Amino acid sequence: RRQGGGAGGRLLKLILQEKADLLTALGCSAVAAVLGMSQSLFLQLVVDRVLPSGDVTLLTVMLLAMLAVIVFRATYGLIQQAVTVHLGRRITLRQGLGFAQHLLSLPQRFFDTRTSGDILSRLTDVQQIRQAVGGTALTVTMDAGLLVLAGAVLFLYHPALALMTVLIMPL
């Protein structure tokens, strides 16, 4: 068995080498998720408290605050996307460097026994697989973090509803 613990272990190692950027991307995702959840809380407050009291001034203030949250969330989403793209590029670059080093370490007979078209075809296939796996691994890592955060917030807010959600959630 090769050093590195298989393809999944090497991919995880590549992702974890970018801890600072990964934590920044996860932080951006967490803030965006909390801002998204705030819309539900806003709607609950409007329906349960503001509309029954008929307080138009409070409704106006809350609407302006929610509009500010929506604008901030959209801006923050752009920042999150830029950080995620940057992180994905760094992981792909690191992965490509490792592949190039491996390719250069192959013996000459590997190249002598294959046509240039065969080698180019393999390089193209590897590039497509690297991009697909790298992007998927990053997305799965970030989505898993957001799932844990959303679950924690839901358990704090309404434990019975959170438990029902977990029970009906497909594994």
Image (spheres, grey):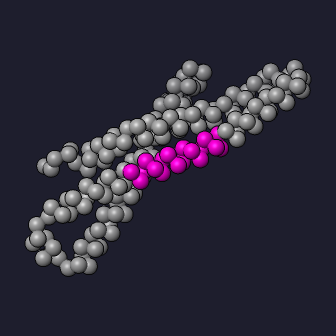
Query: Is 163 or 120 nearer to us in this picture?
Result: 120
Residue 139 in sight from this viewpoint = yes
Residue in the picture at 15% in, 50% down = 2
Q: Which quadrant would residue 21 be assigned to in this image?
A: top left
Q: Which residues are magenta?
A: 73-90
Residue in the picture at 73% in, 29% down = 42
Q: Is residue 56 left or right of residue 40?
A: right
In the rendered image, residue 153, in percent from the top left (x then y), is placed at 56, 25
Residue 82 counted in the magenta span: yes
Residue in the picture at 15% in, 61% down = 105
Q: Is residue 111 left or right of residue 157?
A: left
Q: Is residue 11 above or below residue 125?
A: above
Query: Is 154 or 125 nearer to us in this picture?
Result: 125
Residue 97 counted in the magenta span: no
Q: Is residue 96 left or right of residue 74?
A: left
Residue 136 in sight from this viewpoint = no
In the rendered image, residue 24, in percent from the top left (x then y), is placed at 47, 37
Q: Is residue 146 above or below residue 104?
A: above
In the rendered image, residue 92, in percent from the top left (x then y), is placed at 36, 54
